[in-house]
Image: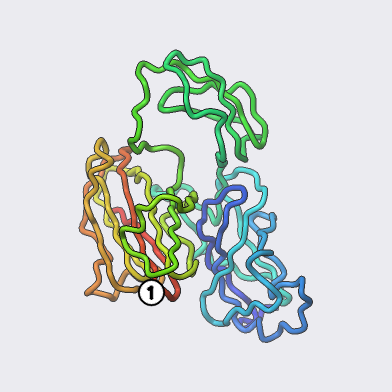
Amino acid sequence: MYIRAYTPTVHYLSPPVVYHEALAELWFDPKSTMNLITGLSTDEMPFINARIQGALIDFEDHVESTTHFSGWRKTRVRGQVGELPIASNHSLSMQWETGKAVVLDHYALHCNVANTSCYEARTVPVIFNVSSNTGYTSGGQNLTVYGHGFGQGNITATVDGVNCTVTQHQERSFSCEVAPRSAVSVDNVAQPGSHGLRRKDVRKSGWPAWSHLDEAGHSEHLSMHFEAPYSNGDKLGNVMSGFFVAPKTARYRFYMSCNDKCILKLAFDSTLPDQKTELLSNHHATGYRAYFGSHHYNLISQWVNLTEGEAYAIEGRHLEYNGADHFTVSVEIE
């Protein structure tokens, strides 16, 4: 028998697309369950575990026996994803002393534009390193790609637009032979690559400024959606950059929320990635994913026309002073 007050709910995994060793946040509401949990030993957590398709999420560095989750509100816990088979749909689960949490499908499910494929969590291969980043137009070079998720095979690889024929593969690496290329590669120009965005994480001892985001020497991470980690610290900044590949020819509208300041830019010409136009600029703190209700804030763009399959350079910039930092960009298709 389920008692509503003591049945936690799982809202969603953020990001919903993950890879081996990625950090992800599980958003949930513990309801009144925390009132029942007492006398935990130092190696226990307030909840028993959370899983992606049966594989445990590791919360060791983020949750302790003394961690408290407020009830009757959406909260989150950060953990590291372990080894999972590559699949287009994995289920989420969360176990408490009172039983399993209920997964709210209307929050947890994500679907493609055609609404033909939906998932709670999806796993993809990840590349950590390549044996060489230079080669020859004559081709014939053998590359070894290191990462995770290559054991199932069925790998199609390209290097700067030319085929790289896979010669062998295993779970953590694969090798391929690069085909000839008619011309040398274009250097120092951003080009579409793998899925995800590059997130530059800028930390400062004082208040950050827009100019600090262009400084070298800061850490970089792979982000699988256009959202910075929630409540990740104070006196920081994020630069999220990559390409938006339009899934269909249509009009698009972009949404943005942040604490404390953020800017969104888009290159309307897919052949000129360095010529970006400012779509949105907000200099006020908003609620998390709160796009509506703040009419004096610039959070929703005008409609823009984009062409199916074209890769448009996109960049978001974010400054956080103090408080619960966040930065999210979403998109609507007409």
| Figure quadrant of the C terminus | bottom left
Whether residue 247 appears in this view of the structure is: no
| Figure quadrant of the N terminus | bottom right
Give the image location of residue 98, x and y in percent.
71, 77
Name the residue rendered at 53%, 28% in the picture. 132
Give the image location of residue 331, x and y in percent.
33, 56
Q: Residue furthest front?
A: 205
Name the amino acid type tagged 1: Gly
Q: Which residue is mark 1?
A: 287
Name the residue rendered at 27%, 53% in the picture. 265
Colour scheme employed for the rendering of this structure: rainbow
Q: Residue furthest bottom?
A: 35
Give the image location of residue 317, x and y in percent.
34, 58
Name the residue rendered at 36%, 36% in the picture. 191
Residue 176 picture quarter: top right
Question: Where is 150 relative to 43, above or below?
Answer: above
Give the image location of residue 35, x and y in percent.
67, 86
Q: Residue furthest top?
A: 138
Name the residue rendered at 69%, 68% in the picture. 95
The number of callouts visible is 1
Whether residue 133 appears in this view of the structure is: yes
